[in-house]
Amino acid sequence: MAEPIIDWILSGIPVPVDVKLFNDVSFIYEAQLAKLELSSWWNNLEEFRKRAAYYETVNGGKTFHYFISEIKGKGQIGRTNQYLTHWYYPYKAKFHPQMVKALINWMGLRRGQRLLDPFAGSGTAMIESKLIGVNSIGIDIDPFCVLMGKVKTDLLDIHPDSLTKIPMKTAFEFFETFKGKTHQVELTKFVEATSASKSPFLEADARVHEFFLLSYLYALSDFTYIQKDMWKAFQKNTSEIMKSVQMFHDLKTDLNIELGTTEIRQGDARFLEHEGLPRGSIDGIVTSPPYSIAVDYIANDLHTFKYLGIEADILQDKLVGLKGKHEDRVRIYFEDMEKTFQSMFNVLKNKAKCAILIGDVTFEGTRLPITRRFIEIAESVGFRLIDVIRRPILGGFARLRYEYMILLEKPS
Ligand SMILES: C[S@@+](CC[C@H](N)C(=O)[O-])C[C@H]1O[C@@H](n2cnc3c(N)ncnc32)[C@H](O)[C@@H]1O
């Protein structure tokens, strides 16, 4: 990116700072985020080098993001997405990890403080906060998302040798025996390594069992959508992620990366206090609410639900965005989001920040004024609006669409 952008980013920083952006930083929103993250950390550049999202170097040294995003995953574009464990399962509604990291930096969250994502999905925010030593809690109503988020964050802690102890073929065959039978096994028992009969995981860490279960579900998804042979897909994906885990393990040792702790559990974003989160206990929130008003997640993942024995009908009633028909669906969506905004406000500490990411949503041919409504709702429950950043989403059917980052603060 041209020099004037760096001048713009550095304007207002009271001391001289030696930084270089990644070469692939090319959008205005990326420069905006680069400025925001630096504005919160210019007075501790050594720490900033460990957590910066959009910079290749800080004070002449390569950033940790440079090394981490070199551990490349399937379909990775530049430094923004799919690196490390982010690619592990083709979940459609993920947000950009690099962007999330910059938002956590903007919030100024320090090591040991706690971030919340009440719509945790595949766990992107949890992975990014873990990497910069910030503790996090993820809540999602969908038990499959909970599994996904747990595996993807656990893989950052786990020793790679524990994954190679069980032969891949044995793991694959074990999960194959449950196909079409999981309704006979309660889900909770099924996902607990120790209670499944004839399990090769009896002696293993429960995280290893969950890892192979997700690997199996990944192969099932490849089979469902692209008719890939399941065993071949399982072998390929599993070997590739194992390489990433090994590379990260080595990097963690070389750079002495101190990871944050992660807790991911099933719960309802509309009632966070009932989910065991006390009032005023959270230091920051990054989240992207369901787009399910436009995208039917249940239909997308039906094969997984069938395999795991999850009752899709029961889940559908609790998912924000899928209740009612036509204008009722839009009304119920905003009512549910109002409950969620109130609930997020309650669990946040005073002066804590909250970033909400939401895309343009077209429902039954009409573009919903979703960003404006979210801002109105946020202000009505007591949040203060700090800024809105717009990000273009390119691709798809060559339509230009936007995603908005609504930046909020809970006043003291
Ligand atoms: C847009 S996705 C989040 C994706 C996430 N940011 C990521 O990077 O993977 C929204 C998520 O909200 C979850 N969800 C829907 N209704 C919910 C509710 N009432 N409580 C908690 N989670 C809910 C869905 O299961 C889905 O995983």
Image (cartoon, helix red, strand yellow):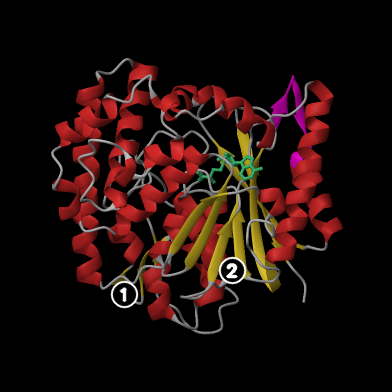
Q: Which residues fall within the magenta stretch?
A: 360-370
Residue identifier under label 2? 107
Left or right: where 87 falls relative to 106: left
Query: Is the residue indicated by label 2 positioned so its CB lies within 8 Å of ligand 1?
Result: no
The residue under the point 59% across, 68% down is 107
Q: Position of residue 191 (x, y in %)?
A: 38, 41
Looking at the rendering, the quadrant in which ligand 1 lies is top right
Q: Is residue 370 above or below residue 293?
A: below
Residue at point 21% right, 40% down? Answer: 240
Q: Name the kind of residue labelled 2 in the image.
A: Met
**Residue at image mark 1:** 60
Q: Is residue 199 above or below residue 182?
A: below
- Assign the N terminus to one quadrant of the image: bottom left
Q: Could you tell me if residue 172 is visible in this image?
A: yes
* Quarter the C terminus occupies: bottom right
Asked whether residue 369 is drawn in magenta, I would say: yes
Residue type pointed to by label 1: Gly
